[in-house]
Image (tube, rainbow, N blue to C red):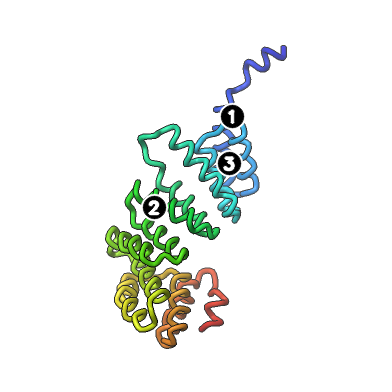
Amino acid sequence: GSTRAQSVLPPPRLVAQRKILEAKLALEGSTDMAVCLAKEATSVHETATGWTTLGDALYKKGQIDAAVMPYTNAIRLHKLSATQIAVPLDLRVKHAYCLLQTNQYTAAQAAYVTAANEWQTSSLWLGAGAASLRLGDKDTAEGYLKLATVRSARAALPHAQLALLHVTTDDDNDAEQHASKVLDLAMRLGLDDASLLRELGNSYFELRRYAFAEALLRRAIAAETKKGANSHTRKRL
C-alpha cells in the first residue's frame, strides 16, 4: 500500500512549480506567505524561477540583504540551463541593485558591468557608475556614466549622476564648472529623482552655492510629495 501511495506522488519538479505559482499569487497580499512558499519550492526542486521568486518575495518584504543570495542562485541556474542565452535583464538588474543598496559596492560594480556587457543598456552602465563612485573610483565611474549617457542621451539620471560625480570629486574650483552643464541638461530633461536631487543639493551646499542648493532641495521635496518629504531634506533646507 505504501509503495503504491509513493508511486502516485507528483514529481518534485511539479511540486516546486505549484509552490512557485502559489508564492507569486501570495506576493499580492502576504509577503510572509510568499517567502514561505518560495522557500518550500526551492527546497523541493531548485529552479531559476523558484530562486527568483524567493528573491522577489524577500525584496518586497524589505529584506534586501537576504534577497541577494536567491538572485545569485537564480543567475547560476540560468547559466547552467542556457549557456548560450543571456541571463534575463530584470534578474540582472534586481541582483545588482540589491548589492548596491546593501553597500556591497565592489560586488555591485562587477554585477552591473557583467550585465551591461550582456545587455548594453543605459540603466546598467548607470548602476556601474554609481557603484564605482561609491568606491571612490572617479575615472572608472566617469567612463561608465558616459556610456550611460551615450546609450540614453535623453534620460535625466545619467547626466545628473555625472554632475554629482564632478561636484563631489573635483577640486572646488572645477567642481561647479564641470557639473553645471550636465546638471542643466538633466534639469531640462525633467530630473525628478528625489534622493539624487537631495544629494546634489547637499553637495552644492558644501560648495557654499546656497541659492542653487536651495533650488535643488526644494525640487527634491516636490519630487517626494507622494510619500512626504525626507526629514533630512527639510532640515538642510
Q: Compared with residue 2, is residue 21 higher up or lower down, i.e. above or below?
A: below
Residue 127 shows in the view:
yes
Asked if labels 3 and 2 touch by Cβ distance under 8 angstroms, the answer is no
Q: N-terminal of the two: label 1 or label 2?
A: 1
Question: Where is residue 129 shown, x and y percent of the image?
Answer: 39, 61
Q: Amino acid at mark 3?
A: Ala
* Residue at x-position 59% and y-position 40%: 38
Q: State the SS at label 2.
A: helix
Hey, which quadrant is residue 191 in on the image? bottom left
Quarter of the figure that contains the N terminus: top right
* Horizontal arrangement in the rendering, residue 234 relative to residue 179 (left or right): right
Q: Amino acid at mark 1?
A: Val
In the image: residue 20, left or right of residue 163: right
Give the vertical position of 222 relative to 19 (above or below).
below
Q: Which mark is residue 23?
A: 3
Q: Nearer the viewer, residue 113 or 216?
A: 113
Q: Confirm whether residue 28 shows in the render.
A: no
Residue at which label 1 appears: 15
The CA distance from mark 1 to mark 3 is 12 Å
Question: Hey, what amino acid is under mark 2?
Answer: Val
Report, in whole angstroms, how far the alpha carbon at label 2 lies from the one at label 3: 31 Å
Tag shown at residue 113: 2
